[in-house]
Amino acid sequence: MDIKGVADNVKTEETKLRVNVNSRSNSAWIGILIIVLVVSGLFFVFKKYGRR
């Protein structure tokens, strides 16, 4: 990513900005587990109580 400032009568310098993003692989599995638990809980509730 390049960042450059532009103005009248001012000499500017270019600055390079480098960003690294590291994520833990466990967080993806925890998110998937939560989604599966919520979907199975909803399935259980609809199966037990039905539409009323």
Image: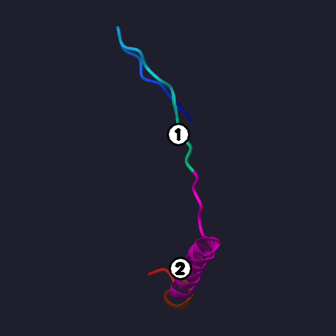
Q: Is residue 10 magenta?
A: no
Real-space Cα distance between discs 1 and 2? 40 Å
Foreground label between 1 and 2: 1
Give x and y (percent) for residue 36.
60, 79
Say what amino acid the circle numbered 2 marks: Val
Name which of mark 1 and mark 2 comes first in the sequence.
1
Above-or-below relation of 3 to 52: above
Give x and y (percent) for residue 27.
57, 73
Q: Main secondary structure of the magenta part?
A: helix
Please tell me which residue lies in front, 49 or 33: 33
Q: Which residue in the structure is indicated by mark 2?
A: 38
Q: Residue at 59%, 61% (x, y): give it.
A: 22
Q: Is residue 31 magenta?
A: yes
Q: Which residue in the structure is indicated by mark 1?
A: 17
What is the quadrant of the C terminus in the image? bottom left
Q: Residue at 57%, 56% (x, y): give it.
A: 21
Please tell me which residue lies in front, 34 or 40: 34
Q: Extreme top residue here?
A: 9
- Identify the secondary structure beneath mark 2: helix
Give x and y (percent) for residue 47.
57, 87
Residue range corresponding to the magenta coloring: 20-45
Please tell me which residue lies in front, 50 or 12: 12
Q: How many marks?
A: 2
- Identify the secondary structure beneath mark 1: loop
On screen, residue 5 versus residue 28, left or right, reads: left
